[in-house]
Image (cartoon, coloured by chain):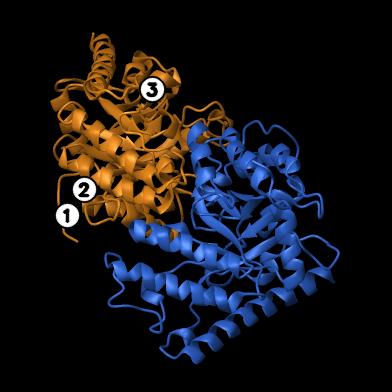
Chain colours: A blue, B orange
Amino acid sequence: MVRKQAGFGDRLIGATRRTGHPLCVGLDPHLDRIPPLFACGDMSPGDPATAGAVRAFLVAVCDRLEGRVAVVKPQLAFFERLGWQGMRALCEVVEHAQRRGLLVLLDAKRGDIGSTSVAYAEALLGPDAPFRGDAVTLSPWLGPDTIEPFANRANVTGGGLFVLVRTSNPGAGDFQDAELAAPPRAGVRTVCELVAASLEPLARSLEGAETGWSSLGIVVGADSPAQAERLRDLLPRSLFLVPGYGAQGGSADDAVRCFVAGPAGPEGGVVNSSRAVLFPGAGHTADAGQWERALDDAVTRACDDLGQALSRRAA
Amino acid sequence: MVRKQAGFGDRLIGATRRTGHPLCVGLDPHLDRIPPLFACGDMSPGDPATAGAVRAFLVAVCDRLEGRVAVVKPQLAFFERLGWQGMRALCEVVEHAQRRGLLVLLDAKRGDIGSTSVAYAEALLGPDAPFRGDAVTLSPWLGPDTIEPFANRANVTGGGLFVLVRTSNPGAGDFQDAELAAPPRAGVRTVCELVAASLEPLARSLEGAETGWSSLGIVVGADSPAQAERLRDLLPRSLFLVPGYGAQGGSADDAVRCFVAGPAGPEGGVVNSSRAVLFPGAGHTADAGQWERALDDAVTRACDDLGQALSRRAA
């Protein structure tokens, strides 16, 4: 396969420099929150019309986000919940988002071995893949060798990877923060730091020619700002995908703690917000104008909040 | 929801007692290995006919396996590789397998947080779920709290879980075997043992009324027999799903090292074989009779091999 486009690291940082903020909008279509404007019937997962309503809602969301944000992050669980009809809706939403100029990061958290890993990479990553993702989230639990097939695929398609290193759920620390008896090197104290250190050669091999940012990034929750700084030392050119901001409780200042100086201000990752942007209170309406204003206002609020945090970080 | 059937631990052990062996057949439809009897066109992933050929092949496989094996394990990556048409084929294969009396273990290796975990559980587990699995494989990396929504769902649907504790790929040990600086208790030395110990309360809560075997099992590769014995001590009533037997190189004796004495011989898990059963050399043919004999012979070989290992273990 001939490499079709610039590396994902370059593409994502290029896009966030243009939008001027690092907001990533999570597309998590909770059925009980879809605005009445888009809902069909009782929105039960078993009703084939439900996938259509989800698709219509997210297509409209992407229309509002065009030119305002760099990247959207569909959460695959909510599509899989709707069966194959949901996966078809996912394909359609991804294609539409890309037509609107948005990068699409598939939140799949996949992780498997050998030829199975290759199959997932071919399913999810690149313009020839059925699900056409620009990037994908991965679990590292099975070992660094299980990330390699995705890195190979990212290299030929200009795709990106975000490996789950330190997540933001209540039990995240139980295994990820466990301390090692025999750390392999300085700066590595815990299991998640061991994971980060093991990714360093692959991350280096995927550094972009234009910005120097790697197409192999990591996921680090906004609730662990001190950990984020240690992980930044281990992976200086990896983009961080930061969940846990907004509805999940992390502050904007904590969310951008991993950012470093760039040509147009601090940069080095994207900060995800799902519910606060996708389902603002005033957006639960059957009125199209009111819904559009509510979504636009929610995007503005998140961008302003993150922008102020970046100004404080730059100071 | 009213609980519809016995727990998965009871159902699986009941079925393997009836078949007399612990073979689980992995349904990994590698496109370049589908027998000419079932292939359509060039079997490229982008051709919509390919998903139909995969479905026809696996439906025929399940017809041969009826009454001979207890459980089949579709690998979701190979269906996702074919897009939403592949996921539709998966639904059809699962329904057909269950009509043939086979239990279906979805090899999904999912793992996510909070409401996302709930969505995956509702997508994959139970007769009301679109993908209707009897059981599912899960990654523990994000923490024990991310397993709970699946355990809750398993409890109400009579479903089963197999958590990835020690896998069989080359890099499996890099994180899973890392030694802990401060083990929380005796018998816990490494990260994978920490994971196993953390699952113990949930495993206990899902022990079956009939056999005492839990519906929360773990995955432990056939290449780590010594580790399997230590994990058996930590989870005495959890079923082990053992990959890495056969084509992946683990011996039958190593594969059943975690088995313990039961009423009808050693029991305590299932041993997976994918390629050796699904794609025997003599089965690569356009002749229906020859294909059927090749598949039947491959099943017999694996059952005999495992049966002899169990006899040696019982001795």
- Does the residue at mark 2 contact the one at mark 1 (Cβ under 8 Å)? yes
Q: Amino acid at mark 1?
A: Arg
Residue for point 47% across, 27% down: B168
User: Is residue B26 something one can see in this rendering?
Assistant: yes
Q: Residues within 10 Å of mark 3 (few under 14, many from 20)?
A: some
Same chain? Circles 2 and 1: yes
Determine which of the numbered discs, if any, sits on residue B158 in the image. 2
Instruction: Report the Cα–Cα distance between label 3 and label 1.
Output: 33 Å
- Host chain of mark 3: B
Q: Is residue B49 left or right of residue A224?
A: left
Q: Residues within 10 Å of mark 2 (few under 14, many from 20)?
A: many
Residue for point 32% across, 46% down: B90
User: Is residue B134 something one can see in this rendering?
Assistant: no
Q: Amino acid at mark 2?
A: Gly
- Host chain of mark 1: B
Q: Earlier in the sequence, mark 2 or mark 1?
A: 1
Instruction: Report the Cα–Cα distance between label 2 and label 1.
Output: 7 Å
Q: Nearer the viewer, mark 3 or mark 2?
A: 2
**Height in image: A314 above or below A86?**
below
For disc 3, the marked residue is B229
Residue A148, quarter of picture: top right
For disc 1, the marked residue is B3
Question: Helix, strand, or loop for circle 3?
Answer: helix
Q: Amino acid at mark 3?
A: Glu
